[in-house]
Image (cartoon, rainbow, N blue to C red):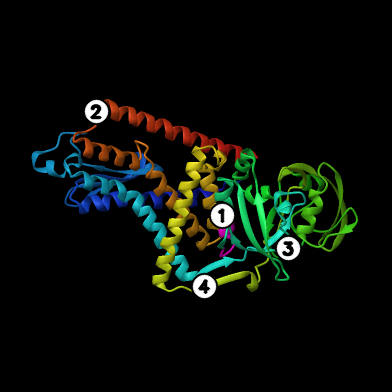
Amino acid sequence: MNLSWQHLLAFLFAVGLLVTVHEFGHYWVARRLGFKVLRFSVGFGKALWSRTAGRDGTEYVLAAIPLGGYVKLLDEREAPVEAHEVHRAFNRRPHWQRILVLLAGPAFNILFAIVVLAGLFWWNGVTEVRAVVGEVLPGSRAAQAGLARGDEVLAFNGTAVAGQSDVVIGLLEEMTSDGRVELLLQSGTGERRTAILSVADPVERRRLTEPENLLRGLGFGFWTPPAPAIIGELEAGGPAARAGLAVGDTVTAVNGTAVADFEDLRRRIEEHPGDSVLFGINRAGQEQSLRVEVAVAEKGGRRVGRAGIGSQRTASLPDSMVRRTALGPGASLVMGAREAWRMTALQAVVFWRMLLGHVSLKNLSGPLGIAEAAGNSAQSGVAAFASFLVLISLSLGFLNLLPVPILDGGQIVYQLVEWIKGSPLSERAQVLGQQLGIGLLVLMMGLALFNDILRQFG
């Protein structure tokens, strides 16, 4: 994980924007329902900028710590309220109105995601990449099931798939459930057959849910266009760097055997864990030989070689691999809502199964992981950064609906209980709930930050 100032700026922009959307939801609905808004703050801590405006004298604040925000409403439980404004205090408004105000923050995050998705679909249309199998590791689960290079996945458990994303989401759901999936495959010659991909061991299934380990752990990947064996990335201090290889070198041979492309090179390296391998390279037209001491890594449950190199950007997919569908404004909005629902439902399933121990806790990311994703997506272009904002906005909306006392979902539970009970919860119950909520959030944030640090160092 290499974080730069560009990553920091992208992170601050993303968090600031999504927090503002969330808090504006609370603010807008509260104002429309007649609540008095005392403060609208983006960020916590010391105010960097503030302004008082409007008929109610609402204070608008930009604070120093940008990891959140809040809307402060008039409330008799926090300070005395003048008699002529009592009817506008939060604690005096009908319970259904209080619940609507609390729901508005997460709802605006979800609506924001739908609007951005609709814009992306309207601008770019719907793009689906065919789920054509590339490499299949010998002896892997995929190989045992009968998958082969060139097979296209047409259906998943009897349901037709549109492309690669459907296959990945389906595999994630099934590997956190019973671990058995039925794939309808079509070979390159047009022959159709069924393959059963099964993982019975729950420990292995949980390992498959670790970041970037699903397809790799099952032992296959999707087809990508062949890339030339040119070194585009070099791990600092890695085996190739120590041997003297440089970005831009073309690897022409390994142990005297010609290399066809970068995938062939990677496969050759993986076949020699811990060995000394002779690379033939072409550097600026000059042929050289360098010996690389290949490191050992684990991939799909087996030892493989690793040299610490990456390819240049892969070639564009051919038109035959991509299905594009243009959409009008209305259809884009419908598709945006449908995709937002699918992503949110998947988050709920994964989160619940994480609590049950079926999904790895390594999936939790803290500020470092989010900053890295923000920076990387921003560097990849506007569409990639917009897609990142959609994912984080939906996550923010979903997490705030959880029934944790200091989150919106927990406060909604309080209001429902008070509505049914006919009187407020005792002060002791509210304090215990707040302490429990803070404890759970600190635990979750601590674990997420721990995961970030582990990724930082390797």
Asked if residue 163 lies in the magenta stretch, the reply is yes
Q: Is residue 249 visible?
A: no
Tag nearer the camera, 2 or 3: 2
Residue denoted by label 1: 170
Q: Residues within 10 Å of mark 4 (few under 14, many from 20)?
A: few
Q: Earlier in the sequence, mark 1 or mark 4?
A: 1
Q: Is residue 330 left or right of residue 391?
A: left
Q: How far is disc 4 from disc 3 in space, using C-alphas?
A: 28 Å
Residue denoted by label 4: 325
The residue tagged with tag 2: helix, strand or loop? loop
Q: Is residue 374 left or right of residue 31?
A: right
Depicted 38 relative to depicted 145: above or below: above
Amino acid bearing label 1: Gly
Q: Residues within 10 Å of mark 1 (few under 14, many from 20)?
A: some
Q: Residues within 10 Å of mark 3 (few under 14, many from 20)?
A: some
The residue tagged with tag 1: helix, strand or loop? helix
Q: How far is disc 1 from disc 4 in space, using C-alphas?
A: 22 Å
Amino acid bearing label 2: Ser
Depicted 11 relative to depicted 357: above or below: below
Tag nearer the camera, 1 or 4: 1
At x 41%, y 57%, the residue is 113
Amino acid bearing label 4: Thr
Q: Earlier in the sequence, mark 3 or mark 1?
A: 1
Residue denoted by label 3: 227
Mark seen at residue 426 = 2
At x 82%, y 49%, the residue is 271
Which residues are drawn in magenta?
Answer: 161-168
The residue lying furthest to the right in this view is 256
User: Residue 161's image quarter?
Assistant: bottom right
Asked if residue 440 lies in the magenta stretch, the reply is no
Amino acid bearing label 3: Ala
